[in-house]
Image (cartoon, helix red, strand yellow):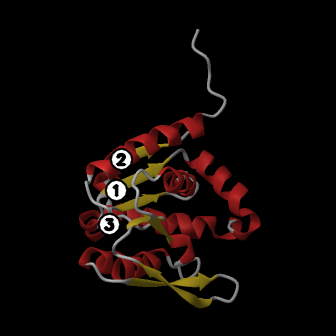
Amino acid sequence: MPSRSSDPFGEVLAAAIERICAAVVATSTSNPVVIIDGRSGAGKTSLTERLIRAWPLRTPVQLVALDSVYPGWDGLERGAETVRQSVLIPHARGELGIWRRWDWERGEEAEAHAVDPALGLVVEGCGALTATPARLGDVTVWVDGPSDSRRRRALARDGDGFRPYWDMWAEQEEAHIAQHRPQELADVVVRTP
């Protein structure tokens, strides 16, 4: 009788990391771009943390998490567009990219961060994968899972700070998915339990 895993979520992420790392190596470049998109609570951040730790190249990798860029709870599309224009396009041109952290408590932009075009880059967050980033990315990833599991994970992570905005955020995710169909642009699709 087969044994049941005590961590099916972890096993799915581990298998995805193997596929993503193999795809990164296959790019044969020292500064590949990985774009990770998906629904809230699906496991994007957990997957990204594991990818950064397992980065298969000798050159370092940089991370831009859209959670640090979204200009508030209604800013999914604006945050994603900012990263496209200020980070992904300059990186593809071999130019320095600059993004500003959003200070969620003060409701305004904070310090600026530079993105070195000579280094690998991971961009993670809902809204990250649209047609332009798909062309600029070397490896594209979509992460999704059942609504109940996603909600439970997201609220366990962000608690009462996210709870009042869950529906507003979910509507923005739905609009992004309907307009851009990111799951169809992904090289790697990850389905978490």
Give the residue drawn at x 40%, y 67%: 128
Q: How far apart are marks 2 and 3 (CA)?
A: 15 Å
**118 to the left or right of 151:** left
Secondary element type, mark 2: strand
Secondary element type, mark 1: strand
First in sequence: mark 3 vs mark 1: 3
**74 to the left or right of 135:** right
Neighbor class of circle 3 (other Cα within 10 Å; few <14, some 14-19, many 20+) is: many
Q: Which of the numbered marks, if any, corresponds to residue 130?
A: 3
Q: Which of the numbered marks, if any, corresponds to residue 67?
A: none
Where is residue 156 drawn, in percent x and y? Answer: 72, 55
Give the residue drawn at x 51%, y 40%: 14
Instruction: Determine whether 135 is above or below 38 in the image.
Output: below
Residue type highlighted by circle 3? Thr
Q: Distance between the residues labelled 1 and 2?
A: 6 Å
Name the residue tied to disc 1.
140
Task: Please give the count of numbered marks on the rendered protein.
Answer: 3
Secondary element type, mark 3: loop
Give the residue drawn at x 52%, y 78%: 69
Q: How far apart are marks 3 and 1 (CA)?
A: 10 Å
Q: Which of 36 and 77 is in front in this view?
A: 36
Where is residue 47 drawn, in percent x and y? Answer: 52, 51
Q: Which of 97 and 10 is in front in this view?
A: 97
Name the residue tied to disc 2.
188
* Residue at the limit of the structure toward the front, as seen here: 58
Q: Are marks 1 and 2 in contact (CB under 8 Å)?
A: yes
Mark nearer the viewer, 3 or 1: 1
Residue type highlighted by circle 1? Thr
Looking at the figure, which quarter contains the C terminus? top right
